[in-house]
Image: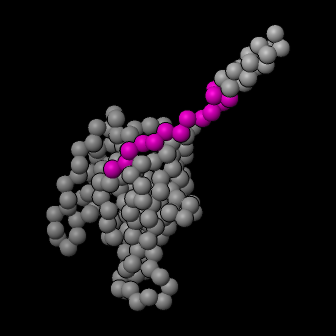
C-alpha cells in the first residue's frame, strides 16, 4: 500500500509539473527587405509593427532613392501575417547593418524574441563618411505580441518594446 501511495504521489507531481511548464513556441521568420539606407529619420533604434498593407506599401515607397522607382511591396495576408520593421537609427558612417541571425523567433507567454546580427564597424577602421540608416523588415505569423525583444548573437538586448 505504501508503494502505491508513493507511486500515485510521484505521478501526480509529474502531472502538476507538466501543467506548470510554459510552452516555448518557435515561429518561422521571413526577411522581406534589408538595407543600409531605409529612410529612417530617427537617431535611435526602433521597432514598428506593420499590421496593414497600406503601412507596408508606404515603407516601400520610402525606399525609392535617386529617382529610381521603389521596389514592389510584397502582398501579405494580414489576417495570418504581420511585418516587423527593425531600424538601427541613423549612423554617421558605413559599416553598420542588420541581418537575421536565426530563421525562427521564440514566443513564450506573448513575449517574442528574435536574434539578429547587429553589425557595427570596428573602432578605428576607416569607413565611408555618409549617414546611413540600416533596417530589416521581417514577416511573422500574426499574433498578440505583448513584448518584443531583439537580441544580438552575444545575447545582449538591442531593442525591446
State the residue at coordinates (31%, 66%).
35
Asked if residue 130 is positioned above or below residue 76 in the image, the reply reads below
Judge left or right: residue 46 versus residue 13.
left
Tell me the colour scheme of the image.
Answer: one colour
Residue drawn where x is 33% and y is 70% of the image: 36
Q: Is residue 17 magenta?
A: yes
Q: Quadrant of residue 109?
A: top right
- Could you tell me residue 144's position as x and y percent? 48, 37
Q: Relative to 157, is 148 above or below?
A: above
Q: In the visual, does 152 lie left or right of 85?
A: right
- The image shows residue 76 at horizontal and vertical percentages of 27, 42
User: In front: 152, or 50?
Assistant: 152
Q: Nearer the viewer, residue 20 or 12?
A: 12
Q: Is residue 34 visible?
A: yes
**Which image quadrant: the N terminus?**
top right
* Outermost residue, right side: 2
Residue 82 percent across, percent down from the top left:
36, 43
In this figure, what is the number of numbered marks? 0
The residue drawn where x is 40% and y is 38% is 142
Which residue is at the far top? 1
Identify the residue at image location x=28%, y=46%. 54
Residue 103: give x, y in percent of width and height: 38, 52
127 is higher (above) or lower (below) than 114: below
Q: Give the residues in magenta.
A: 16-30
Looking at this view, is 121 or 154 the one in front?
154
Q: Is residue 39 visible?
A: no
Instruction: Assess whether residue 22 is covered by the magenta stretch.
Output: yes
Amino acid at each position: 500500500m505504501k508503494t502505491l501511495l508513493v507511486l500515485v504521489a510521484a505521478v501526480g507531481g509529474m502531472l502538476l509539473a507538466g501543467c506548470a511548464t510554459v510552452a516555448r513556441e518557435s515561429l518561422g521568420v521571413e526577411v522581406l527587405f534589408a538595407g543600409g539606407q531605409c529612410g529612417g529619420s530617427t537617431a535611435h533604434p526602433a521597432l514598428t509593427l506593420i499590421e496593414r498593407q497600406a503601412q507596408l506599401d508606404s515603407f516601400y515607397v520610402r525606399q525609392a532613392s535617386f529617382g529610381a522607382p521603389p521596389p514592389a511591396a510584397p502582398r501579405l495576408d494580414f489576417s495570418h501575417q504581420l511585418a516587423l520593421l527593425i531600424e538601427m537609427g541613423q549612423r554617421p558612417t558605413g559599416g553598420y547593418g542588420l541581418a537575421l541571425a536565426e530563421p525562427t523567433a521564440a514566443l513564450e507567454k506573448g513575449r517574442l524574441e528574435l536574434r539578429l546580427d547587429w553589425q557595427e564597424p570596428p573602432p578605428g577602421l576607416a569607413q565611408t563618411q555618409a549617414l546611413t540608416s540600416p533596417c530589416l523588415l521581417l514577416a511573422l505569423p500574426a499574433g498578440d505580441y505583448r513584448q518584443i525583444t531583439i537580441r544580438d548573437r552575444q545575447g545582449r538586448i538591442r531593442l525591446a518594446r
